[in-house]
Image (spheres, rainbow, N blue to C red):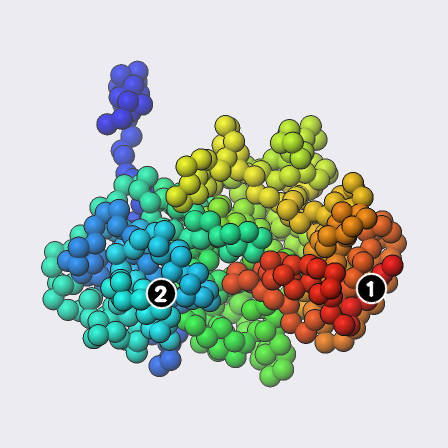
Amino acid sequence: MDERTMTGERLHAGSMQRHDLTVEKFLDHAAKWHPDVTVASAGPDGVVRTGYAELRREAGQLAAALSARGITRGDMIATLGWNTKGHVLLWYAAAAIGAICHTLNPRLSAAQLAAMTARSRPRLLLYGSGLSSLASEVTNGALATIAIDDPERSAGTSLSELITGGEGNMAPVWGAALEDDPAGLCFTSGTTGPPKGVLYTHRSNYLHTLRLLQADALALTTDDRVLPIVPMFHANGWGIPFAAPAVGAGLVLPGRNLDGAALAGLIASEAVTVAAGVPTVWLDLLDHVERHGIALPSLQRIYLGGAAMPIDAQRRLERGLGVSVHASWGMTELSPLGTVAPHGVDRTRPGSAGRAPIGLDLRLTDVSGAVLAEQREAEGHLQVRGPSVVRRYFGAVQDATDSEGWFDTGDLARIDPDGSLTITGRAKDLIKSGGEWINPGEIERIVAEGLDTGMVAVIARADAKWGERPVLIYEASADVDVEALLDGRIPRWWMPDAIVRIDRMPLAVTGKIDKLALRATFGAAEAVASDAVLRA
């Protein structure tokens, strides 16, 4: 009993029960109260469906098998997999014995992944369908590997064999973790700098789940069937694999195939009501639906994240799919939900990412860190704090927050009178030209409204006279009069010195525009493409 509880008992002769906030309790709840609600997992042989009670039984056997292989509380295991039943089983089995699940991104190179595992030092690496070669490159034979999916067996060892074999029949080990124990590790995408590790605890994940489930957030209920297209290796799949069982909602896992045809078929066959993913996925789905005249009547709500979507594209989605589209903003460091556009408000307000649910606080500061006297209708540097916000990066020796616990997101933002947040740019992206600041985010927003894809980026290029000047790169199949889109809407001296059209915008693994790649290609004056529009 801790000192605070003892003090409470002395003062009031009473106390409340202590139950650690650990994430395996979400699956326990679903198995007890929603035993037959389905978890559907798409794979090469079709869709496999399992009830929550059966999923809990298999997770218990897997937890016992992992314990039999020497995995104990505090050990790290790495996963290299897609959104599948096996991956979800692994999450809950690891959590139940107090192990830490380091989710690796299969879209990174073997060298990048090896650098991450060198830091996290996992005891095992478990890999998904089609990833055996990459897993071998990452481990180079120095780490035991197990296949998550049967078709990718390695030396005869797969997840199903652990569950059904002798190791899984020993007395199950379940509920070994405490709420302040680490539960998961995820590295940031590194679109603007080196990736950094964020170590989630059971408590932070539990409280994030409660925040996610609020009526002004995802508002999931047992009547929903939820499709997390966002990968589980992106900040815990936005927390959806925890949130769905927490309320007994059906969970639909798409596997590795995320093209429009596969998603349309899965949404139809599993009667999906709610789905979440990055804008490019939704545009591909919409193109397929419109091309083939398909209706998806069960789908009600779509949640966007990872990158902003132009307002016209949001409205096209709403019309074409018959859904409500909800923008959001978040970060790996926030577990990741920051804000989300709730029901009953103008969700298509340009640039709005919605309001912050309880459990996350926001504030705006000036460049020196001083809190702005007026927090509404003013642009400032966005800071956040809360029980699901990073305090210190994995392996770091100093906190990433100030003395009051505020974390600087690196974003520039504005808060509207109703509390809605609009991200106006990245502080690191600001361009200082002739001693004055240019905000690339504002230029990008205006141009994106005039593009079919909305893919536009503004980067800085060194300039002998002005220090830095803006260069604009956009994705389009034909030339667009970008200057006409910007004329009269930005200061004349903000007009980019070079405008470059490319066929395909480089994207980071999170779906965000990879500005590091753009700077490497277009950041030097001599690197401007031949079809660029150069300004004097």
Instruction: Identify the element where label 1 is drawn.
Output: strand
> Quadrant location of residue 278?
bottom right
Q: Residue at x 46, y 71 (%)?
A: 271
In the image, taking residue 345 as reference, residue 235 lies left or right, namely left
The residue where tag 2 is placed is 138
From this view, report whether residue 146 is shown above or below residue 235: below
368 to the left or right of 231: right
- Crowding at dot 1, Cα within 10 Å, few <14 / some 14-19 / many 20+, comes out as few
In percent of width and height, residue 48 lies at: 33, 74
Q: Which residue is drawn at 54% across and 46% down?
A: 338
- What's the residue type where badge 2 is placed? Val
- Residue type at mark 1 is Leu
Q: In this view, does 279 lie to the left or right of 527?
A: left
Vertical arrangement, residue 90 with respect to residue 401, above or below = below
Distance Cα–Cα, label 2 vs label 1: 44 Å
Q: Earlier in the sequence, mark 2 or mark 1?
A: 2
Q: In this view, does 31 lie above or below 281?
A: above
246 sits left or right of 157 in the view: right
Residue shown at the point (40%, 57%) measured from the top left? 115
Asked if residue 426 shows in the view, the reply is yes
The percent position of residue 85, horizontal first and vertical second, equals: 33, 67
Q: Mark 2 packing: few (<14 Cα in 10 Å), some, or many (20+)?
A: many
Residue 357 image point, x, y percent: 53, 43
Residue 534 image label:
1
In terms of depth relative to the viewer, which is nearer, 218 or 427?
Answer: 427
